[in-house]
Amino acid sequence: MGGWDVLAEAGDRARRGEAFALATVVWREGPSSGKESCRAIVTEDGELHGWIGGACAEPVVLREARQALAEGTPRLLLLGTPERFGTVPDGMTVVPIACQSEGALEIYVEPVVPAPHLVVAGRSPLAHTLVALAAALDWRAELSEDLAAVTGQSYVVIATQGHNDEEALERALARDPAYVGLVGSRRRGEAVLGYLADRGVAPDRLARVQVPAGVDLGAVAHREIAVAVLAELVRLRAVRRPVPVVVEEAVDPVCGMTVSPRDPVEYEGVAYHFCCSGCRGAFERDPAAYAKKESRC
């Protein structure tokens, strides 16, 4: 994909509620296969769509993009040999690479984290109020009877308030959302969960249901209950901690660059990985000159 195609793909992914990182080349010093305005999408599981640079730049960008996405913070990368840059501005991350082309790249990595997705089942005033409050926070919020739009990242609130609670909750649990809450008393919740248990819904799924949904304020007006439910969802989102990204890496024994492990050459029982065919060829001609006692991954 070209740069503009990547932006179109990024827009499509954002509308689908997918998280990804957008990497853009903002400066280059040739020779380098990456050019200004080259762009790439890096998904949460490490897939790269687009073009950001060759074998030297790609593993670095994959690693840094996934970490930026996990932390939710952008970063500006400077790729090349540190000696050539002199004073580096604060906030810029220098990543040494020993590319044979001797090029350099400056790449801006921006995590794109979609707005929370709230799906509310029900037609009650509380359900409408909850959707309106969430929309005021720029969440993607919608009323739904069939819950067809629910994904693994969705927050689902069952606010049917006695109208087919059991069926709505069963549909929600079948889609394995990030959160599912039932608006109602604890006594009503026990009855609904007991009914679903008798229908064969797995105990581990039933245990995920929050009853009553939201901060328990007792008997209050529906607007206050909607605020209490949304407050709980905001808190849950705020306390989420970044999941450390584990990326397999190896060190090219010839140039010392960090690379993605692939197509190894084995020597004396140790697997070695390379950034390019030049380093691979140098190693194969004289492996003893570069071999280490242990691999570093």
Image (cartoon, rainbow, N blue to C red):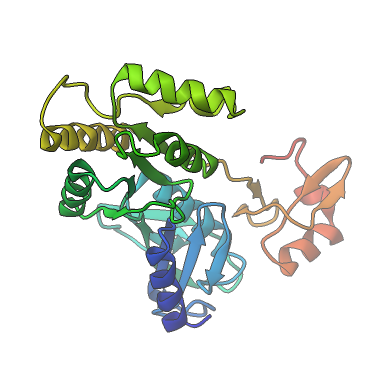
* Residue sitting nearer the eye, 294 or 135: 135
Residue located 56% across and 52% down the image? 45
Examine the rendered structure and indicate whether residue 24 appears above or below residue 200. below
Residue 50: % across, % down: 53, 74
Residue located 30% across and 24% down the image? 212
Q: Is residue 137 left or right of residue 294?
A: left
Examine the rendered structure and indicate whether residue 260 appears above or below residue 204. below
Residue located 16% across and 47% down the image? 133
Residue 171: % across, % down: 49, 43
Residue 14: % across, % down: 38, 64
Q: Is residue 50 left or right of residue 275?
A: left
Q: Is residue 207 visible?
A: no
Q: Is residue 33 left or right of residue 94?
A: right
Task: Determine the residue located farthest toward the right in the rendered image.
Answer: 268
Q: Which quadrant would the C terminus be assigned to in this image?
A: top right
* Residue sitting nearer the eye, 49 or 217: 217
Residue 27: % across, % down: 37, 74
Q: Is residue 273 left or right of residue 2?
A: right
